[in-house]
Amino acid sequence: MLLHDPATLDSSALKALIESRVLAAPRTETDNDWRYGPVSPERRRHLRKFFPEQPVPAAVLVPIVERDEGLRILLTQRASHLSHHPGQISFPGGRLEHPEEDFVEAALRETEEEVGVSRELIRVAGFLPDHFVVTGYRVTPVVGFVDPLFTPRVDPTEVAEVFEVPLAFLLDTRNHVRRVRRFENQDIEFTDFPYEGRNIWGATAGMLMTLCRMLRGDDE
C-alpha cells in the first residue's frame, strides 16, 4: 500500500505517481470492466460466456489535464442520436481501423476526430490493463497528459459535449456509489461516479476504478 493518499498529493507528485504506475502496467485483460472488485474463478467463467472468442480491438484515451486547481480527467458525453450508448459518458476512442494501427495511434486519432485535440498536444504516459466490454470489444486505455491550452472542437455526430472531473474527486472513495443493475437475469453490483448532474458508469467507470486502484496501490 502507498504511504500517502494520492488524493492529497500535489499535481507534480500525482503526475509522477501516475507515470510510474501506468508505465509499469501490463497491457493485459482485466475482469473489472463492468463489475468492479475481485472476481472469483467461478464468476470469471460465467462472465466469459458473454464475451466473443475474438473481441474487437479498440483503444480510448484517458486524458489528464493539469489545471491550477489540480489534475482533471477529460470526458465526453456521447451524442443522444447514436445507436450505441447514446448520451453516456465515455473517453474519446474507438476501434482500430486496420491491423497495422496500434493502440496509441488509434486513441490519438479518435481523440482528434471526436474532440479536436491534436496529438501534438498530448504526451502519452502509458497504459491501463485492457478491459473487455460486453458489446464485444477489448479496449486498451491509453493514459496521456493533455496541454491545458487546448481548445475542444467536438464532432457533433459523435459527441454532445466535453467536460472535466477532478482526479481528486474520483480518488475519494466517498464519491464511489455502489448500485445494483439487472444483467442477464442477475443482479450485478456496479460502482458509479455521480458528478454535477451526470452519472459516470459502465466501462468508463470501470477504467477509472482501475486507475484509482493502481494509484492507491490496492493490488499490492
Image (tube, rainbow, N blue to C red):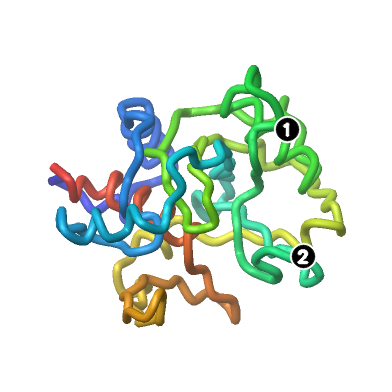
Picture residue at 50% right of the left edge, 49% below the top: 71
- On the image, the x and y values in percent for residue 171 come to 35, 59
Tell me the element at label 2. Answer: loop
- Image check: 143 left or right of 102? left
Q: Find disc 2 in the rendering and name its residue.
A: 82
| Amino acid at circle 2 | Leu
Going 60% across and 81% down the picture, which residue do you hit? 197
Along the horizontal axis of the image, is 214 left or right of 110? left
38, above or below 149, in the image: below
Along the line of sight, the residue nearer the viewer: 53 or 197: 53
Q: Is residue 16 visible?
A: no
Under tag 1, what secondary structure?
helix
Residue 111 quadrant: top right
| Distance in Å between CA atoms under marks 2 and 1 | 20 Å
Q: Is residue 195 left or right of residue 216?
A: right
For disc 1, the marked residue is 109
- Quadrant of residue 127 in the image? top left
Q: Identify residue type, mark 1.
A: Arg
Q: Nearer the viewer, mark 2 or mark 1?
A: 2
